[in-house]
Amino acid sequence: MAKILGISYDKANRWIKTYWDGKLSKDFQEHYSWKVDGSRAISFHTLIELFVMGQFSDAGVKPNDVIIAHKELSNAYNSRFPFALREVIDGMRMDPGRKKIFWEKDGAVANLNGSKQLNLHFIKLFLIKLDFDHSNMANKFWPMGKDHSIVIDPERKFGHPILNGRNIYPEIIHGHFKAGDSIQFISCIFEISEKEVKDAIKYCEAA
């Protein structure tokens, strides 16, 4: 999760324990993460929400203010994961003069205080990296963008990043490349395109 989002492990772990499994879980009477063979796992939608949380953190918004807005939006949209909804992501706005971050949707407004400029351009780029289902809930995440082969699909390989349509972990491709195999050779033995090989290598090296 930390590698996918480009944040530190300690920060990801702290946010999950303190906010999602802490303050938010009290409202819904269940945790947002669980243990699997000694490791902590989270849902795909929690992953998406953590990205949004990171954007607010970078803009100087206090985590407690984010949690308050999360609760308000949960009630407004009747969802445990309001930050994973298209309407919420698309409705983010910034008032730089008053250093206010807010959502606006059909006249309803949720406010946050921010000390820096929220990178709305980055938020919009994030929006186009997502696919949404019929209820406008995020259901796929393309961490490098949809012009690359790596996808995170909660219905495939338990949400682990894979090559789209291949069910191949990018780490496997990267491992062959690090061992000295050429891109052409890897492409041949896995029966994938050279672009898919390069996407897997680029993704792993960035992570």
Image: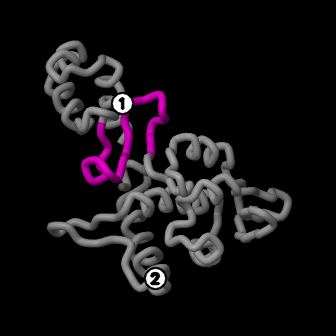
Q: Nearer the viewer, residue 13 or 25?
A: 25
Identify the residue shown where x is 22% and y is 18%: 187
Check disc 2 and report the residue beneath it. Answer: 28
- Image quadrant where one finds the N terminus: bottom left
Residue picked out by circle 1 = 202
State yes or no: residue 153 in magenta. Answer: yes
Which residue shows up at 51% across the image and 67% down it?
81
Task: Name the residue: 26% across, 33% down.
Answer: 166
- Give amino acid for label 1: Lys
Instruction: Give residue 79's quadrant in the image.
Output: bottom right
Q: Nearer the viewer, residue 169 or 206?
A: 169
- Could you say where residue 107 lies in the image, as x and y percent from the top left? 81, 66
Question: What's drawn in magenta, residue-wise?
Answer: 141-162
Q: Amino acid at mark 2?
A: Phe
User: What is the residue that sits farthest to the right in this orientation?
Assistant: 97
Element class at badge 2: helix
> x%, y% of residue 140?
43, 47
Q: Toward which corner of the image does residue 193 lie, by quadrant?
A: top left
